[in-house]
Image (cartoon, grey):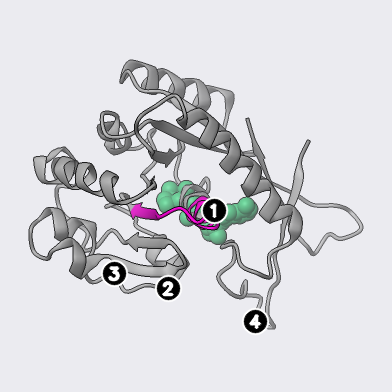
Amino acid sequence: MKIKLFNRKKNKKGVVDGPAFALSDKSKFAIVESYKSARTNIMFSLSASDKKVFAVTSYSKGEGKSTVSANLAISFSKMEKKVLLIDCDLRRPNVHNIFKLDNSAGLSNVIGKMVGFEDAVNRDVLNNLDIISAGTIPPNPSELMCSSTFVDLIDELSQEYDYIIIDTPPIGVVADALLLKDLIAGFVVVVRERSTTHGDVQKLLDSVKLADSKVLGMITVGCSMSKKRSKKGYYYYQYY
Ligand SMILES: Nc1ncnc2c1ncn2[C@@H]1O[C@H](COP(=O)(O)OP(=O)(O)OP(=O)(O)O)[C@@H](O)[C@H]1O
Ligand SMILES: [Mg+2]
């Protein structure tokens, strides 16, 4: 089954209005429900693990990782659980744009010991939802993610939060996401309809397996156009 997710509305200048794909009180019932269903499935997948930390990734760029991370974070926070969303895409960060946050200090600055976590985190962006943006784009993202400061930080934060959701760069482009493998319960993989190929998915699954990590589930982000409503795009999410 596919669920209609989103009607993209353009303003007079042809630009897509608003925070585009972020869930809000005005989001359609089907959109909210599709994320709820993904949330429930992820919670079941996580129940076998002590860790309540997971990363969202995909094989190629632009497949919807940041959007899905943001919306899962919103959906998890609605359950009265304390949620932290981390933008771990230190190369092409986007979470701060989705939530319209300042990105002058973020994760990279905390790991680089330029600021403390408290100075970088955005508390209560929504009820129960804290967010740390990526921060200054560093010259050595992979090294930062391998550092003991980062490992200790995630360890410490795992005590404070019920769920930690990590947005990552695409696995087919850089291996950053796989560096998280020991810190997380597994990966939620985003697949984009008519864009992600079988080969991409296979290579991603092979990489995750090789890294001795696991895939918690897959979310399909899709788009189709009906003839009658050719000016409107319809977007779908599906969880496996
Ligand atoms: N469900 C959707 N349907 C259509 N377009 C979408 C959907 N979700 C997000 N987009 C659009 O797709 C583009 C990429 O989304 P997003 O930034 O979430 O992808 P990403 O995988 O995080 O990209 P990157 O690899 O650059 O980090 C954005 O312009 C976003 O507005
Ligand atoms: Mg992104």
Q: Position of residue 21 (x, y in %)?
A: 59, 61
Indicate which disc, 2 or 1, sits on the residue closer to the N terminus.
1
The residue carrying pointer 3 sits among few (fewer than 14), some (14 to 19) or many (20 or more) residues within 10 Å by Cα, namely: some
Q: Gap between marks 2 and 4, in whole Å? A: 21 Å
Quadrant where the C terminus is found in the figure: top right
Name which of mark 3 and mark 1 comes first in the sequence: 1
Q: Nearer the viewer, mark 2 or mark 1?
A: 1
Which residue is painted at 83% across and 59% down in the image?
A: 230
Along the horizontal axis of the image, is 143 left or right of 191? left
Residue 79: assigned label: 1
For the point 33% across and 53% down, the residue is: 86
Q: Check disc 3 and report its element: helix, strand or loop.
A: loop
Give the mark nearer the N terminus: 4 vs 3: 4
Q: Quadrant of the N terminus?
A: top right
Q: Residue at x 54, y 53 (%)?
A: 79
Q: In the image, which residues are magenta? A: 70-86
Report which residue position mark 3 lands on: 103
User: Residue 13 bears which disc, if any?
Assistant: 4
Which label was assigned to residue 100? Answer: 2
Amino acid type indicated by mark 3: Asn
Q: Quick one: SS at disc 1?
A: loop
Q: CA distance from mark 2 to mark 3?
A: 9 Å
In this image, 66 relative to 160: left or right?
right
Question: Would residue 156 appear left or right of 191 to someone viewing this image?
Answer: left
* Residue 198 image offset from top left, x and y in percent: 58, 24
Residue 80 forms part of the magenta stretch = yes
Task: Please state which of the two labelled residues, at mark 4 or mark 1, is closer to the viewer.
Answer: 1
Image marks 2 and 1: residues in contact by CB distance under 8 Å: no
Query: Is label 2 in contact with label 3 (beta carbons under 8 Å)?
Result: no
Evaluate if marks 2 and 4 touch, with contact meaning CB atoms under 8 Å apart. Answer: no
